[in-house]
Image: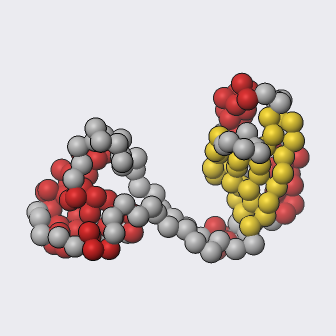
Amino acid sequence: MASNLEIDKLDLQILSMLMENAQMPYTEIAKKLVVSGGTVHVRMKKLTSMGIVKGSHLEIDPSMLGYDICAFVGMFLEKGSLYNRIVKQLQKIPEIIEIHYTTGRYGIFLKIISRNTRELRSVLNDKIQPIEGIQRTETFISLEESLKRPIQILREEELET
């Protein structure tokens, strides 16, 4: 954690609770932390204005909506200097849900969600491979997501006031 950020234990407790359940009402958080609902609201506004909180989102199970394939794609670039231009093209492909600039073997690492292998193949062959500057790709299909959780910013005992 950067030392120039003016956050305290209460801020971290609020964040921890909301990271576990983003729909938890501020009043419930306030009761658990023995502060007012207004305090929680003011703290969240502060954390948002500091750029620590970037928003909230609704998490769904893609497979329940017919999106059965989760794939990761490692991309080899012709030149690292092409990264920004390539990312702009990749951002236009709706099946790509994450783009990471990486060290090591790949220049870019993607996460793709698609309905089936036919759709995945179309994304790879018709949308990604034609982008100029991509040398080649390696694709990994996820068979099961065994763990997905937010970072732990406080230990269990620190959640208590």
Give how far across and how far down residue 90 sits, in percent: 71, 39
In the depicted view, which residue is nearer to us: 66 or 25? Answer: 25
Can see residue 127? no
Left or right, residue 92 beside residue 48 = right
Q: Could you say which quadrant of the image residue 126 lies in?
A: top right
Quadrant where the C terminus sits is bottom left
Is 99 in front, or is 12? 12
In the depicted structure, whether residue 158 falls above or below residue 39: below
Residue 56 % position (x, y): 41, 55
Q: Position of residue 122 (x, y in %)?
A: 86, 51
Using the rendered image of the protein, determine whether residue 148 is visible from the camera's viewpoint. yes
Q: Is 149 displayed left or right of 74 in the figure?
A: left
The residue under the point 22% across, 68% down is 29
Going 80% across and 34% down the picture, which residue do you hit?
77
- Looking at the image, is 23 positioned above or below residue 108? below
**Front one among 71 and 146:** 146
